Amino acid sequence: MSAPSNPTLRVAARDARVVRCREICRDHVRIEAVLTGFPASAPGQFLQVLCHDPDDPAPRFIEWSDSPTPGLARPAPAEDTAWLRRPFSIADRWDDPDGPTHLEVISRAVGPGTRWLSKLRPGDTLDLSGPLGRGFDIPDVQRPLVLIGGGVGIPPLLYVARVLAQRGALDVTCIFGATTRDLLPVPLCQQPRADGVATRCVELPGNARFPALVTTDDGSMGMRGYTTTALRAWAALRADAASALICACGPDGMLRAVAGVTRELGMTCQLCIEKPMACGFGTCLSCVTRIRDERADGGWRWALACTDGPVFDRDALLEYAP
Amino acid sequence: MQLRPPATGAARRLARPDTLRLVNTAGPNPPASSAAGPGLPAGPGDPALDPRMRVRIGRLELRNPLLTASGTCGYGPEYAGVLDYSRLGGFTTKSVTRLPRPGNPPCRTAEVSGGMLNAIGLANVGLQRFLAEKLPFIRTMPTPVFANVAGYSIDDYVHVAGALDAAGGLAGIELNVSCPNVAQGLMFGTDAALLGEVVRAVRGVVRSGLLIVKLSPNVTDIAPLAAAAVDAGADALSAINTYVGLAIDGESRRPLLGNVTGGLSGPAIKPLALFNVHRAYREVAKAAGVPIIGMGGVRSAADVIEFLLAGATAVAVGTALFLDPTLPLRVCEGVTAYLDRHGAANVAELTGALRLT
Ligand SMILES: Cc1cc2nc3c(=O)[nH]c(=O)nc-3n(C[C@H](O)[C@H](O)[C@H](O)COP(=O)(O)OP(=O)(O)OC[C@H]3O[C@@H](n4cnc5c(N)ncnc54)[C@H](O)[C@@H]3O)c2cc1C
Ligand SMILES: Cc1cc2nc3c(=O)[nH]c(=O)nc-3n(C[C@H](O)[C@H](O)[C@H](O)COP(=O)(O)O)c2cc1C
Ligand code: FES
């Protein structure tokens, strides 16, 4: 029986120290935290982050004090408190030579949990479990690789870029999309082009120096259109486009479009999906998605996004079937 | 260890002279395999293995009163890497039904103030795959494991409970007669006559392990249901299952859950759970000498103490495992500290020790 000091997973460790919080664009914060003993992780894996003050509506062991009413002075969770943990893709991870691990998440404020995260300041502590789930599976870094991120789906692909650079991949192109220019959660080092030619316009983590295409729905930055507009532009310039592996994460509509275009162009594709999660460990059975299974009744069964995913092969996912 | 003498006819008939020790509670030292993780005390001072923490559920002795609640801890492997089962009082599996069930369409859970709603729809692998794929791991777990059984007819319950009891490797069966998510599931747990019938039928086939009946709170008064379960031969009661609830998205005018309604769990239901545990204890369980496993919103040592005082002998952690799967072990320290502070000899002494005058 494995002991709680698990080499592959850390749970509920209240020891990540926030060292940097940056507002990277409207509604988005990029949080860097430092902790020791964080297990090996892969891009596409996620963290379950406690998005309330652990000393406030404490979900765990309360110190018994000698006060007259020990344990009773506990404040009840307010209306606007995120009680359950919230899942966040690892946006970047690197390790100092002397041990400590740096983890980054990029969070878009959409509700109580993400609003709480946006108020964090350097010096605060963060309680997170992870790394959880299955990440992208990229055995061959010689083939053409395209990383497609839409909005707050971009974070896991930044971590992919770092790891691909480390592994010596050369033929990597990023396609990052947003609805409009001030909702693009990545730093730019030069103006992205509007004509479909990828340039080193995005600052990627680590030593990644890959060219990128940026799209906005309203044309306020980069190409006007969707990430699939850019994917078609990229493919049009490449004779070997069909041999590419596409890694994508983003809103549902974008993933559906990416699934369609990659299928049409004969490309392999892995999709990182988002489902509402309660546990992140495969115990609550809430994060289900239909996947193809010939042996099952009706040819499909439910899979869990938290443990079977969140990254799935495009063709396994029934919701993105042709 | 203070034991309440069995009092009613039903309880006396079922009391067995042989005290079955399914758990190694030989001493305060953890087994060699249980190296403690960061922040988790182990060794001679480990509160989870403190002899004062031992409690008795029927003829079974638990090393401490902390269990996991059905549906929040899978079948065992899910938390094996993070929750040290050799220090846990007991484990309860996800509900098992006769046939596999795919479960409800998404969305299956929604967070609400102070807790969450779930409408999983009893998704589970079914009896055959449970026996083939889940039981082998369960047999290796160094803690008593209770299989939670759900069904849609008395025949279902008898078939599944009988097969599981006969398979060996389980400490007992917990009957889920109260799942509020599946339309037909409501009736067994809310009708005293029907509840008595199903418990009596299952009692006949559960021979080697304990029979625990999990009560539904979706009733006007839990006492007649507790009495029906005890009279039909339950070795223990667990209380409570979730409350039926509804969450609405006003903008889209739609329910948040795919199943429309769901079961409410978490801190929001704790006062209701304490009330029901206390009522079942005072009206039925105390006199019958039948232990209660209390649950509903437990997330701290303070909560555990409150459930014990209300009448529970053991306490299960459910939804709070989603925040911290190690919570059942972490709270042990607070419980032993309470024993020290109150000069209590052991946790069993706290059961029903609520002062009403
Ligand atoms: C594997 C995974 C990785 C994720 N990575 C990131 C990330 O890197 N950055 C980021 O900002 N967000 C990410 N998310 C989404 C993030 O978890 C939610 O935005 C967050 O839970 C919202 O919490 P809240 O309390 O702020 O808002 P809530 O009040 O909980 O939700 C606000 C709105 O968002 C919707 N929502 C909540 N959770 C999800 C979800 N999981 N998927 C889709 N919609 C949801 C709700 O229905 C509601 O409309 C990820 C989700 C998953 C499952
Ligand atoms: C996601 C989820 C799934 C559950 N599934 C089951 C189940 O299959 N069978 C059962 O008897 N109870 C089930 N329960 C109820 C719990 O075992 C427990 O009785 C209830 O949640 C109250 O405890 P809590 O507030 O600590 O969660 C489930 C609860 C949750 C939150
Ligand atoms: S989030 Fe609980 S099973 Fe996936």
Image (cartoon, grey):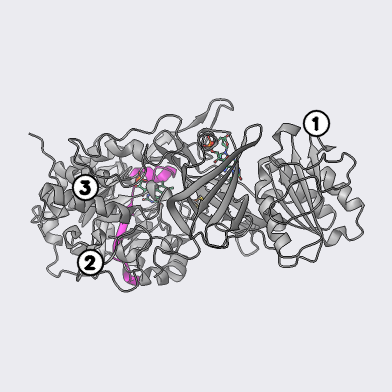
The amino acid type of the residue labelled 3 equals Ala
Q: Which residue is mark 1?
A: A218
Residue A104: percent from left, percent from top = 59, 48
The C terminus of chain B sits in image quarter: top left
Q: Which residue is mark 2?
A: B44
Distance in Å between CA atoms under marks 3 and 2: 43 Å
Q: Can marks 2 and 1 be said to lie on one chain? A: no
The amino acid type of the residue labelled 1 equals Asp
Q: Secondary structure at mark 2?
A: helix
Q: Nearer the viewer, residue A235 or B288?
A: A235
Indicate left or right for B277 with A109 as reference. Answer: left
Distance in Å between CA atoms under marks 3 and 1: 66 Å
Q: Residues within 10 Å of mark 1 (few under 14, many from 20)?
A: some
Residue B188: percent from left, percent from top = 33, 46
Q: Which residue is mark 3?
A: B228
Check if residue B161 falls in the magenta segment: no
The N terminus of chain B sits in image quarter: bottom left
Observer able to see residue B57? no
Q: Nearer the viewer, residue B241 or A67?
A: A67
Q: Which residues are magenta?
A: B166-187
